[in-house]
Image (cartoon, rainbow, N blue to C red):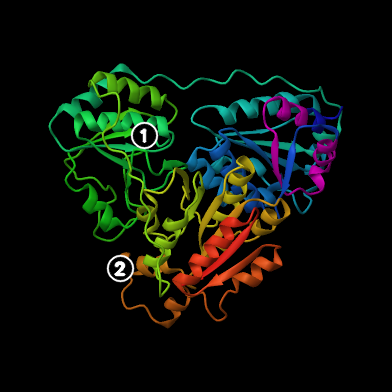
């Protein structure tokens, strides 16, 4: 048994049974080993950003890591943007990156690169296997690193000769550390803030935004009057009728400052203190008032759910929350297709237990409000700000949850970064309905142009934010990738297209022309 087969057997035995791949020559022994080992599903992506984004979406919904297979430094480099997003989402993931044989490095062949140096900024754990005899044990350690709280990106570099030389067979995964219990002092401090009489908010992120965490946070809010807020960007949020509603801090800095301006205390529940996405002239980086006190209930790697339960007991919270989202849908809109009617159309038809992929950027801003009372669903966001996550995130979520409809709300400019994911959706017959918000512009950047003080932009500046000349033809792009779809230019047409797309058991794309 060679090193590559030892590694594949280690991955499968360690519960890693999906591999999102874009291999090259140095990975061929790993590819060959996949046929000799049962239990590993392989999903091909035509660009490494699709591969890494899909592994992120899979981890968020499966609550366990997938593997990626990437080709040397350039292949890893192509996947960096979505590894950045995955690291921010705290998604467990194992990257297997092929490399030249150890003895070949001395010859400085064209693909030679500092793979460890490329990997470190987006990885929590990096290692290069020194020999085939070490590969299985290194793979087992990578699994343990990926599964360690709060979820980590592990990158294992596999020189070609360590894949083809004789290996050891599968290695056992080391024990996975449990989430740490929060200090008693953190509970006492949070309880004092809640009892202070000041205006207080709990700021939540994953996993506190899952149903058990939301229920406990709702009990605390019922006892204390605290507001429940979520970070602007979160890996996964469970929403919908019958669940405790949480308000996300808005992305636009002025709206965020207005929302938080009266707070005296913010209790961080696995979250970071709220800061502006960018620096703006004359505006603060910190979004809370100078007088607002920040309290840490739990760190991301700590037992957040246990901390919420402990805090609820500490303040004698009632057994159930008082506020749950009521079942409600907007009426199907008629007439012109606008941002408002787009949001209403999606709220009118969002399926029960849907997985929503949110990379709507500017055009999707009103959709959270129109879907608050829809049947229960999950909401996955762009976490690191690096656009192009939506289509591959949908791939990974659909692989993880084949029995649930994935609804991808997608800005057109961002979708162009990883539109190859549509081909993977077609190849795997993944149940994804994608709605492209075709405003034919980097609309968000038009707002940012003013926010950063770039006044009186001229034709060259505005041209850099325009996606016309020529307009993108999303139906042709989708058809070329093997995905059926339709175009909507009115709200009535969008209603019809959504009904058609949601009825299909497989991929469907809707171009919503705004």
Other residues around mark 2 within 10 Å, as few (<14) / some (14–19) / many (≥20): few
Q: Mark 1 points at which residue?
A: 214
Q: What stretch is highlighted in magenta?
A: 7-35
Q: Foreground: 480 or 3?
A: 480
Queried whether the magenta region covers residue 218, the answer comes back as no
Q: In which quarter of the image is the N terminus?
A: top right
Mark 1 and mark 2 lie on one chain; the one further toward the N terminus is 1
493 relative position to 459: left or right: right
Q: Indicate the position of residue 414 as horizontal and vertical percent values.
A: 52, 62
Task: Determine the residue positioned at 51% across, 60% down.
Answer: 410
Q: Foreground: 202 or 93?
A: 202
Q: Nearer the viewer, mark 1 or mark 2?
A: 1
Task: Determine the residue positioned at 45% across, 28% down.
Answer: 301
- Name the main secondary structure of what is drawn in magenta: helix
Q: Quadrant of the C terminus?
A: bottom left
Identify the image quadrant of residue 169: top right
Query: Dot 1 lies on which element?
Result: helix
Q: Name the residue under label 2.
A: 453
Q: Foreground: 327 or 430?
A: 327
Q: Indicate the position of residue 462 as horizontal and vertical percent values.
A: 42, 77
Identify the image quadrant of residue 509: bottom right
Q: How far apart are marks 1 and 2 (CA)?
A: 39 Å
């Amino acid at each position: 048994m060679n090193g590559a087969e030892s590694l594949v057997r280690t991955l499968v035995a360690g519960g890693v049974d999906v591999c999102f791949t874009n291999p090259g020559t140095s990975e061929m022994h790993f590819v060959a080993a996949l046929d000799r080992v049962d239990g590993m599903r392989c999903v091909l992506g035509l660009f490494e950003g699709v591969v890494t984004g899909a592994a992120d979406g899979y981890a968020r919904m499966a609550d366990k890591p997938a593997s990626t297979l990437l080709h040397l430094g350039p292949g890893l480099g192509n996947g960096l943007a979505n590894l950045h997003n995955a690291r921010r989402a705290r998604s467990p993931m194992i990257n297997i990156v092929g490399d030249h044989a150890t003895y070949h490095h001395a010859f400085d062949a064209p693909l030679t690169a500092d793979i460890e140096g490329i990997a470190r900024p987006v990885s929590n754990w990096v290692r290069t296997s020194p020999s085939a005899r070490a590969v299985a044990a290194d793979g087992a350690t990578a699994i343990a690193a990926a599964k360690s709280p709060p979820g980590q990106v592990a990158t294992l570099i596999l020189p070609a000769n360590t894949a083809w030389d004789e290996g050891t067979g599968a290695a056992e995964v080391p024990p996975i550390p449990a989430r740490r219990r929060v200090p008693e002092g953190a509970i006492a401090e949070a309880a004092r803030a809640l009892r202070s009489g000041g205006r207080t908010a709990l700021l939540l992120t994953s996993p506190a935004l899952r149903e058990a965490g939301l229920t406990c946070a709702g009990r605390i809010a019922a006892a204390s009057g605290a507001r429940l807020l979520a970070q602007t960007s979160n890996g996964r949020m469970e929403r919908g009728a019958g669940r405790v509603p949480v308000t996300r801090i808005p992305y636009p800095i002025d709206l965020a400052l207005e929302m938080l301006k009266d707070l005296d205390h913010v209790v961080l529940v696995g979250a970071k203190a709220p800061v502006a996405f960018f620096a703006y002239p004359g505006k603060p980086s910190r979004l809370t008032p100078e007088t607002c006190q920040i309290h840490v209930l739990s760190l991301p790697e700590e037992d957040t759910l246990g901390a919420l339960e402990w805090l609820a007991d500490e303040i004698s919270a009632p057994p159930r929350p008082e506020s749950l989202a009521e079942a409600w849908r907007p009426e199907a809109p008629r007439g012109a297709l606008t941002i408002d009617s787009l949001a209403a159309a999606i709220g009118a038809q969002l399926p029960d237990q849907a997985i929503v992929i949110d990379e709507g950027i500017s055009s999707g801003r009103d959709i959270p409000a129109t879907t608050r009372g829809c049947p229960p669903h999950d909401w996955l966001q762009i976490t690191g700000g690096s656009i192009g996550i939506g289509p591959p995130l949908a791939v990974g979520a659909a692989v993880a949850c084949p029995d649930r409809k994935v609804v991808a709300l997608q800005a057109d400019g961002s979708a162009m970064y990883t539109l190859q994911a549509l081909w993977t959706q077609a190849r795997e017959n993944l149940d994804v309905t994608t709605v492209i918000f075709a405003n034919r512009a980097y609309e968000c950047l038009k707002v940012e142009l003013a926010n950063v003080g770039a006044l009186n932009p001229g034709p060259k500046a505005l041209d850099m934010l325009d996606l016309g000349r020529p307009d993108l033809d999303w139906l042709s792009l989708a058809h070329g990738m093997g995905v059926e779809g339709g175009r909507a230019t009115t709200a009535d047409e969008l209603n019809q297209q959504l009904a058609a797309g949601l009825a299909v058991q497989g991929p469907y794309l809707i171009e919503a022309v705004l």
